[in-house]
Image (tube, grey):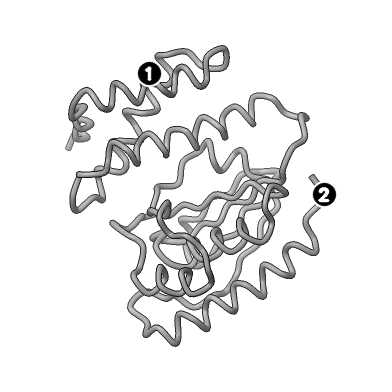
Amino acid sequence: MSASPPPAWPDARLSAGAARLAARYQGHFSVETVQQLLTDSYRLLAEGARVRTHLVVLAERLTGERLDALAHTQTPGTGGAVRVLFVCGHNAGRSQLAAALLAHRAGERVTVSSAGTDPAAEVEPHVSQVLLESGLSVADAYPKPLTSEVVEAADYVITMGCGDACPVVPGRHYLDWSVADPDGAPIGVVRTIRDDIDARITDLLATLPAS
């Protein structure tokens, strides 16, 4: 069976997003490269979406992350923040908790990304709640697919429960955290998972090199 064609661009908003991204990355990437990545990001997000109301906005954000990662890999040896990627199955629980906690604690020292090998439609409600309890904003959190650009740009790839689907790229530092899955768990259990991840982040920060 042949692959399904990518979803058509929904309206002029996606074209406007492509123009904004092309302007931001002018001199780094061609308009055609930006448009191709934006089309692909929209397709990837649409595959698992329940509703498509916000897909245009999310596709632009995902494309920005991919372009940032691609720019980093094309200019090796330029230094900058350590890049850490968290990967789990659905990018709705553990990897979202880890990314939010590390970004909050590390600040500009670390560039943090998260992704899922089979992303869910939305972040787990209890995960959002325990992050809010920790004083962290969840407004920008959304499950996103794992893409080659983000993996290849990472200095550290930390996997949590994605098994054989987790990425392997030579030259990266790999850690596998055996963390319970918060999917469907009661709020008390999700708080315990958050605290477990936070303790692991304390250990991680002690080992990361200075930027």
Query: Along the polypeptide, which appears first: circle 2 or circle 1?
Result: 1
Along the horizontal axis of the image, is 72 left or right of 89? right
Residue closer to the observer: 100 or 39: 100
Along the horizontal axis of the image, is 79 left or right of 123? right
- Determine whether 78 is above or below 191 in the image: above
Q: Which residue is mark 2?
A: 210
Name the residue furthest right. Answer: 210
Q: Are marks 2 and 1 in contact (CB under 8 Å)?
A: no
Task: Name which residue lies at 60% across and 69% down.
Answer: 177
Task: Name which residue lies at 43% across and 67% down.
Answer: 93
Q: Position of residue 108 (x, y in %)?
A: 69, 47
Q: Quadrant of the N terminus?
A: top left
Quarter where residue 196 is shown: bottom right
- The answer for how far apart the CA atoms under marks 2 and 1 are is 36 Å
Element carrying mark 1: helix
Name the residue furthest front. Answer: 135
Quarter where residue 152 is shown: top right
- Determine whether 171 is above or below 181 in the image: above
Quarter where residue 54 is shown: top left
- Amino acid tagged 2: Ala
Task: Name which residue lies at 81% across and 51% down.
Answer: 209
- Amino acid tagged 1: Ala
Q: Position of residue 115 (x, y in %)?
A: 46, 52
Residue closer to the observer: 13 or 145: 13
Crowding near the residue tagged with mark 2, few <14, some 14–19, many ≥20 C-alpha atoms within 10 Å: few
Q: Position of residue 173 (x, y in %)?
A: 70, 52
Residue closer to the observer: 148 or 77: 77
Along the horizontal axis of the image, is 166 left or right of 170? left
Element carrying mark 2: loop
Q: Which residue is mark 1?
A: 19
Q: Position of residue 149 (x, y in %)?
A: 53, 36
Q: Quadrant of the C terminus?
A: top right
